[in-house]
Amino acid sequence: MTGQPLANRRYCALFLPLLSADRWLRDHPGETGPRLFTEKQSGAMRVMAVDEVALSLGLAPGMMLADARARVPEVQAVAHDPQADARLLDSIAEDCDRYTPSVAVDPPDGLILDITGCAHLWGDEAGLVSALVTRLVDGGMTLRVALAETPDKARALARHGGELLRAGRRLSPNRLNEERAPYMPAAPNVGNLPVAALDLGEERTTALKRAGLTVLGDLASRPRIPLAARFGPQAVTRLARVLGEEDVRITPRRTPPALSFARRFAEPVSHTDFVLATLADLVREAGEELARRGEGGREFASRLFRSDGAVHALSIGTGQPTRDVELVLRLFRERIDTLEDPLDPGFGYDLIRLDIPVAEALGVTQTDLDGNTAPAREVALLADRLGVRLGQARVRRFAAGDSHIPECAGFTVPAHTPVLPLTAHRAAGDPPMQPLRLFDPPQIVDVIAEVPDGPPRRFRWRRQTHDVVTFEGPERLSAEWWKRKDGAGLTRDYYRVEDRQGRRFWLFRHGLYGAEKPNPDWYLHGLFG
């Protein structure tokens, strides 16, 4: 989605330049550098990441290990583990869900958060950013943070400007210090950023520098058409995004919910009863908002954020849209009771959030003449309770498939999954055109017919002979066109037949006699009654 940025949209970008080193220090506290993280490429060891000490000595990613050791002989080299770095980055992103439900990973060492509409939970934007930075710095991470109205601009400011925040470092007044004064990142002029902030690759970046264009301000002051002709249209596109002229929305790790409600606590809470009471308040608040919109929730997801960074997720689904507070709370309680591992609050939860990923229009609930809930509603409630206890994927219902082939015309889906209603209906009292239950696969039978392409007169199935007294058909079904094109699909002629004992069967001849097959086989596909 592109276009002019909205004035009220805000993004927060995080850059973790020493992610590998910070992860290493978490696992090996107290060890000192300089340290390099290397990987074998093209038969040689190359530096992929460095720690802060090595960086201060002039060592940088991209160098050969031999060159680095020639400069700093005492440097330590350890194997680079990008998978471990990715897991740490993902865990940080998981913890950042406490600040906004829209978090995108910017691999290999960055995150972008869409904080639009989330700042009020932390007082203001400064409170949100201060809490975010405090949590990461206290967790031993080194980072840069930047705010902007578009994600590309925030990313460029975080990676190529701003203040580097380190664990254990006292910052100047009006920065994140030991008294926890509110922190807000400085807002440097984006025009002063180097052209490397455009991420155009080494070749184009070098070409820009050779042309005397070293900072973004040099490009912003020039006409775009000549720039596109000389350096490519991508350079102009990236320039517009970094300058904040276009807003290309982030792709969050999770789909943002339709509605979201949260409670933050000054002190972590650990009592289960208090957690359930807080969840009840959030459900009631959600019910009021859903009622105002004339909607009901189909899915409810609770996320309990522990003070040590762990996140406990609970989710329930309903077969029909609802805003019944007592129903949702009962399902959440049953969900907690069915957990294999009980909730461990640890040092307590400091944030509880309730998301409603799916909401649908909800009208007045239909009741019968006695004022009781309609049978369909009762079935939906039963499916909801069974789904919470057994797992939502294990409680299933039938749905129609978009196919004329009988075995593909129906399938099962989780009971809480919305599906399109059936469009074909038969009149009340009419016999079914197809059996409700089919054999999979169809069972081959021996058939005697008066003429090769005529209806069956007698057939033998499971060593028993059945004489046909009446029949209906044929109902001709062609194979899918893509199978007919390859010559693999055969036409089916279906017959509904009844034997002398009144038993009804559904048979088909597989292939047109003479045209598709010299001697077509017969199959029993299902039983009526």
Image (cartoon, rainbow, N blue to C red):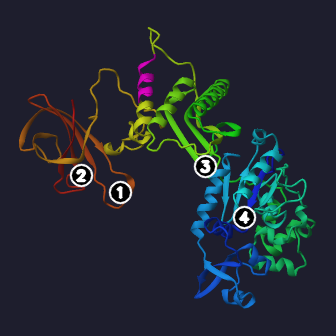
Marks 3 and 4 sit apart, C-alpha to C-alpha, by 22 Å
Residue in the image at 82% along x and 42% along y: 124
Which amino acid does the dot numbered 1 rest on? Lys
Which amino acid does the dot numbered 2 rest on? Gly
Closer to viewer: mark 1 or mark 3: 3
Closer to viewer: mark 3 or mark 4: 4
Q: Earlier in the sequence, mark 4 or mark 1?
A: 4
In this rendering, the answer to whether 155 lies above or below 291 is below
Q: Earlier in the sequence, mark 2 or mark 4?
A: 4
Mark 2 lies on residue: 511
Residue in the image at 78% along x and 72% along y: 232
Which residues are the magenta region? 373-382
* Residue placed most toward the observer, 12 or 2: 12
* Marks 2,4: beta carbons within 8 A: no
Whether residue 246 sits left or right of residue 252 in the image: it is right
Single out the residue that lies furthest toward the right. Answer: 221
Q: Is residue 322 magenta?
A: no
Q: Residues within 10 Å of mark 2 (few under 14, many from 20)?
A: many
Marks 2 and 4 sit apart, C-alpha to C-alpha, by 65 Å
Q: Residues within 10 Å of mark 3 (few under 14, many from 20)?
A: few
- Which quarter shows the C terminus? top left
Closer to viewer: mark 2 or mark 3: 3
Whether residue 302 sits left or right of residue 404 in the image: it is right
Q: Is residue 436 among the parts visible in the rendering?
A: yes
Mark 3 lies on residue: 254
Mark 4 lies on residue: 16
Looking at the picture, how far across and down is residue 123, in whole percent?
A: 80, 39
Looking at the picture, how far across and down is residue 475, in whole percent?
A: 27, 39
Mark 1 lies on residue: 483
* Marks 4,1: beta carbons within 8 A: no
Single out the residue that lies furthest toward the front. Answer: 30
Disc 1 secondary structure class: helix
